[in-house]
Amino acid sequence: MPHRKPKNEATKRLVVLGGAPARKGGAVWLVGAGPGDPELLTLKALKALQNAEVVVHDGLVSDEILDLAPAAARRISVAKRKSRHSYAQEEINRMLVAFAQEGLKVVRLKGGDPFIFGRGGEELEACREAGVECHVVPGVTAALAAGASAGAPLTHRGSAQAVTFVTGHAASGGEPDLDWESLARPNQTVVIYMGVSTAAGIAARLMAAGRQAATPALVVENASRSDERRILTKLSELPDAAADVAGPALLIVGEAMALAQAGGQEATLQDEARALELGVKS
């Protein structure tokens, strides 16, 4: 058996390790850390984190949540911020497999839910292909927290009979290739993840496909966190609202957003008038 190297060296070795014989007891848990508020963790997520020996986490996972893991657990950040990636996805996949094959309990801690634009499916496939035991623990996705804190339901009997989650960023960069005509239909809520930088194009395509320029829209920055900020606007002004955002944010478009309250200020008379005009009833 080779001599175990110090933590940082062992991590680097395991990132590129392939084909090592698996030891008993190792497994991977893909855990949803929720949108940021530690109180929104599920009990199952908390239990997995408290039993972790290695925590491979996103950059957006808060220190308050990371501190719920044992002090002896290894913490490895694989933060992804736009074009600045500390690890490629393939490296993360190999890392999870390699640690599990070392016989360790590995928690892959992901913001929100692992299967909502979290690339959890790719990591699950990598574990399956390697014969590594893998469990999935769902988490509260940011859209649910954003709607709840703003008091704006994502579905509403009078104004939103459907809700659709879409990505605002294509795999190759730039705007995504979406069914714009479908998304432009009235009385539905469209939640755009990772759409701040492409807000202008998204708004233009929705309006070109028939969505009304006056459709209420909401930008939620740092949903559920202490520094959460909400900006009420309308579809035609969504690009300007998104330009004022610095942190991670969601763009939400739909008639039900007329019920939202802006963060840090009281709901305005214009918001109430807009809700009445659109026929939204509480």
Image (cartoon, grey):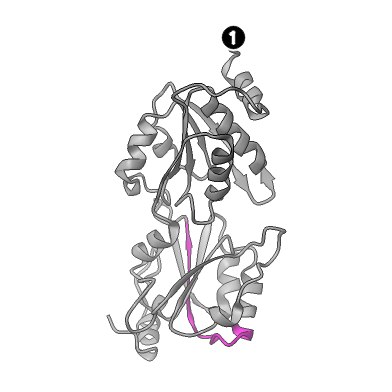
Label 1, on which residue? 1
Q: Position of 248 compared to 15: left or right?
A: left
145 vs 237, nearest the viewer: 145
Q: Amino acid at mark 1?
A: Met
Q: Is residue 195 magenta?
A: no
Q: Position of 83 compared to 125: left or right?
A: right
**Which residue is drawn at the image coordinates 40% and 83% (left, top)?**
270
Residue 177: percent from left, percent from top: 66, 70
**Which residue is drawn at the image coordinates 53% and 22% (left, top)?**
102
Label 1 residue SS? loop
Q: Is residue 41 above or below residue 105?
A: below
**Which residue is drawn at the image coordinates 55% and 85% (left, top)?**
211
Q: Position of 202 compared to 160: left or right?
A: right
The magenta-colored residue range is 206-221
Classed neighbour count for the residue bearing mark 1: other residues with Cα under 10 Å, few (<14), some (14–19), many (≥20): few
203 vs 55, nearest the viewer: 55
- Residue 209 found in image quarter: bottom right
Residue 170: percent from left, percent from top: 66, 62
- Residue 1 found in image quarter: top right
- Is residue 180 visible in the rendered image? The answer is yes
62 vs 140, nearest the viewer: 140
Residue 205: percent from left, percent from top: 64, 79
**Quadrant, the C terminus:** bottom left
